[in-house]
Image: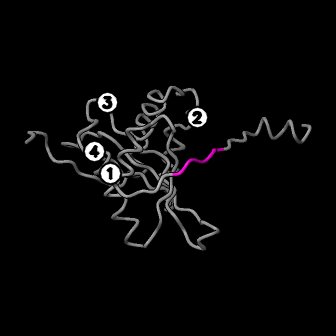
Amino acid sequence: MTDDPPLTARRAGPGDAGVVLALVREIAAHEGDVSDVRSTAGTWAAMLDRPDVLVLLAERAGEPVGYVSAVRRLHLWLGTDVLALDDLFVRDGHRDAGVGRFLMTELARLATAEDLVVRWEVRVDNTAAQRLYRRLGARLWPKIVAWWPPEAQRVVLGD
């Protein structure tokens, strides 16, 4: 049994923009691409004020230990909205302690209230995450993710 305070989850709001940005920078550093983070506390405050953007913070004794983020969007094949999970991140020192499962459970609580599918991508080399997702009952299949940045689009357009 652990002496850790219990985990709590809450939806992040605009006032949490700085905390969310710090967590996003941490996951980017963990994945080796922190230079890709272009958002600011200001853009996060605006995003967290949108009803289609969902960020759940996991906290222990009021301190953030992880988050899950998703965007509600239309899925054309299903003809209904889905939650497109963007990130699931647990801070170093809190991993392998059930925080990821806790966040996914809280996300499921919100998704099932509206019968929404949750859809996301996972890196091929992230086998720990894949194990967690399989234990949760998620279906995994390989797929190539395409990323077409504006500078590459401009080349095609001749700009």
- Confirm or deny contact between disc 1 and disc 4 (CB under 8 A): yes
Q: Which residues make up the magenta segment?
A: 141-145
Q: Is residue 144 magenta?
A: yes
Q: Which residue is label 1 attached to?
A: 103
Which residue is at the front of the view, 113 or 48?
113
Label 1 to label 2: alpha-carbon separation: 25 Å
Distance, label 3 to label 1, CA atoms, is 16 Å
Q: Earlier in the sequence, mark 3 or mark 1?
A: 3
Q: Quarter of the image containing the N terminus?
A: top left
Q: Which residue is mark 2?
A: 38
Tag 2: Cα neighbours inside 10 Å, few (<14), some, or many (≥20)?
few
Q: CA distance from mark 4 to mark 3?
A: 11 Å
Residue 73 is situated, as x and y percent measured from the top left of the image, at 57, 62
Q: Nearer the viewer, mark 1 or mark 2?
A: 1
Element class at badge 1? helix
Dot 4, how many residues are within 10 Å of its Cα: few (below 14), some (14-19), or many (20+)?
A: many
Figure quadrant of the C terminus: top right
Q: Say left or right for 107 vs 119.
A: left
> Which residue is most to the right?
158
Task: Decide which of tag 4 and tag 3 comes sooner along the chain.
Answer: 3
- The disc placed on residue 153 is none
Q: Which mark is residue 99?
A: 4
Mark with earlier residue (2, 3):
2
Residue drawn 43% across and 72% down? 115
Where residue 4 sits in the image (x, y, percent)? Answer: 13, 40
- The residue under the point 29% across, 47% down is 58
Residue for point 76% across, 40% down = 150
Q: CA distance from mark 1 to mark 4?
A: 6 Å
Kind of residue sitting beneath label 1 = Leu
Please say if the residues under marks 3 and 1 sit with CB atoms less than 8 Å apart.
no
**Mark 4 element type:** helix
Point out the tag, 1 or 2, that comes first from the N-terminus. 2
